[in-house]
Image (spheres, rainbow, N blue to C red):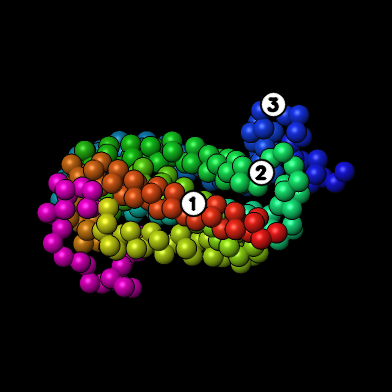
Amino acid sequence: MTIAEASLPSPRDTKPHLPLVRIALRQFWPLAVLFLLFAVGMAALLVHLHQDWDDAVALRNRIGSTDYHFALHAGGAHDVTTRLLDAGKRLALLPALYAALVAGLLTGREWDTRKIVFALGQSVTPVRWFVVRWTVLAALLAVPLAPVVALYRLNVTHAVDLDLLTYGIERHTAYSVVGPVTVAYVLLGVAAGALAGTVLRNFLAAAVAGPVLTWLLVAVLVRSRAALLLDFPAWPKVDDFHSGGVLGLQFYDVLPVDSFLVNSLGKGDYWPYQLAESALAVGVAVLLALAAFRVLRHRIATR
């Protein structure tokens, strides 16, 4: 019996999902540990940043609000805003691109090495095989990311409430962009990578196509402002498109951002905007997953 054959559950298994979950965890753990190290490092950075807000308040009290906000002081508004934005850049879309890369790589490898052929003769169907693998991968990435996003949000709200950040687009970007949608983008990335791997059946091609597809879909969601169609209180505040950047986009590291849109939202618009955009991102992820299953069934039917 080969390793691939041994890794599949036998017909006697009474709980077919559990063996598949264990298999996925054994195979995915190096990639999951790598992402966990990223999450722990980001959490440590954000905890340290949260401790620095007291120093920022003390500096503002010592030199005055005007100098704190508009002069260049170590630990002043420009300094702490830059550090907060740098942390946000790492969270905004990089986890989603990593999810798409890993999902495309692993799914393409299943086809490239013909491991999926072994599943056809077992008690587990190929559809169930991939459902479990994609679900486990999404959980391994989304679960550790969620508390890091919460820590970032804690930092931002604390800094804004104390008026410690610079004014203008940087403050709005730090406040509005990172949140539940950051986790939703990870689910979108897994679905995009799964579709790329299923269609291309080559792990190198899928590892490129998955992140590219994720980036393009996020850019369309941001630029079209489709999320605001579900957020009627925020919609009247946005009357025009920002004309700068590539295709009208500006960038928060690799995340496409429409600065005019972000600058139009107030503090009260944060949750409606985030939840609306998250719902759309998850909806697109579901459509990509359904497309992947459709292609998968077609591949199986033609064998």
Question: How far is disc 1 from disc 3 in space, using C-alphas?
Answer: 27 Å
Residue at 21% x, 62% y: name it: 260
- The residue tagged 2 is 125
Is 249 positioned to the left or the right of 102 in the image? Answer: left
Question: How far is disc 2 from disc 1 in space, using C-alphas?
Answer: 16 Å
From this viewpoint, is residue 70 visible?
A: no
From this viewpoint, is residue 259 visible?
A: yes
Q: Amino acid at mark 2?
A: Thr
Is 50 positioned to the left or the right of 115 in the image? Answer: left
- The residue tagged 1 is 290
Per the image, label 3 sits on a secondary structure element best described as loop
Residue in the foreground of this view, choosing between 27 and 70: 27
Residue at 43% x, 36% y: name it: 147
Is 192 positioned to the left or the right of 106 in the image? Answer: left
Region rendered in magenta: 228-253
The reply to whether dot 1 and dot 3 touch (C-beta < 8 Å) is no
Within 10 Å of the Cα at label 1, are there few (<14), some (14-19), or many (20+) other Cα atoms?
Answer: some
Q: Amino acid at mark 1?
A: Leu
